């Protein structure tokens, strides 16, 4: 019995849908390239878990090439071997990322800023926001606030000091230290 040939980069690149149907080019072990009649191509992985057949999107071709699609599929198969449903795992990870973004330093600092502005004069309010946006958010703004530690703050302050702005570094550090507020 002959082994089924695997896909090649050239076959993926040149593949088109036949007539008005969606075409599937199989690579093996459940990985296939789904080709629409308008030329769009998507990598998908077909798998079975808990006696239920499912499929999972792995990316758009050619952004995700054949080699990368195979690596993604293998990573999903490893999860399946541990009895983890890749689609549920993806959903959980998206939710975690969404929660982390909502609790990023920038999100929390902007909320703190909005609550403080009514107690400040307009010029001070603008200065604080300018300092945060120019000197803090580019360095630690995207980090979940629970993960930020002293060394990260120190590195950020050193960058400001390196520009020769010792007074600004002191003021930024005062703005960033919202832990006691």
Image: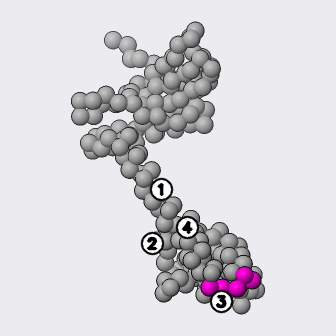
Q: CA distance from mark 4 to mark 3?
A: 22 Å
Q: Mark 2 touching mark 1, by CB under 8 A?
A: no
How packed mark 1 is, by other alpha carbons closer than 10 Å (few <14, some 14-19, many 20 or more), is few
Q: CA distance from mark 4 to mark 1?
A: 12 Å
Residue 98 numbered mark, or none? 1
Which residue is rendered at x = 27% and y = 34% of the image? 49
In 3D space, how far apart are the residues under numbered discs 2 and 3 (Cα atoms)? 23 Å
What's the CA distance linking mark 2 and mark 1? Answer: 15 Å
Position of 78 with respect to 44 (left or right) is left
| Residue 109 seen in the figure | no
How packed is label 3: few (under 14 Cα within 10 Å), some, or many (20 or more)? some
Number of the label disc, if any, that sits on residue 107: 4
Foreground: 177 or 18? 177
Q: Residue furthest top?
A: 19
Q: Which residue is mark 2?
A: 146
The span picked out in magenta is: 119-123
> Residue 137 at x, y = what percent?
63, 70
Instruction: Tell me the quarter of the image containing the N terminus.
Output: top left
Tag in front: 1 or 3: 1
When asked about the image quadrant of residue 152, the answer is bottom right
Residue under label 3: 170
Q: Which element is circle 2 on? A: helix
Disc 1 and disc 3: Cα gap in Å?
32 Å
């Amino acid at each position: 019995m002959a082994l089924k040939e695997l896909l090649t980069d050239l076959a993926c690149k040149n593949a088109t849908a036949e007539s008005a149907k969606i075409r599937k080019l199989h690579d093996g072990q459940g990985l296939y390239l789904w080709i629409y009649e308008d030329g769009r191509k998507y990598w998908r992985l077909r798998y079975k878990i808990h006696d239920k057949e499912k499929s999972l999107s792995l990316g758009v071709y050619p952004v995700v090439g054949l080699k990368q699609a195979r690596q993604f599929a293998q990573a999903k198969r490893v999860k399946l071997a541990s009895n983890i449903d890749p689609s549920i795992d993806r959903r959980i990870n998206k939710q975690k990322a969404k929660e982390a973004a909502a609790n990023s330093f920038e999100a929390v600092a902007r909320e703190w800023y909005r609550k403080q502005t009514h107690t400040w004069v307009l010029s001070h309010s603008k200065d604080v926001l300018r300092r945060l946006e120019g000197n803090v958010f580019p360095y630690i703004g995207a980090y979940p606030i629970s993960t930020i530690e002293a060394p990260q703050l120190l590195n950020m302050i050193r960058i400001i000091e390196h520009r020769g702005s010792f007074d600004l570094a002191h003021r930024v550090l005062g703005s960033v230290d919202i832990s006691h507020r």
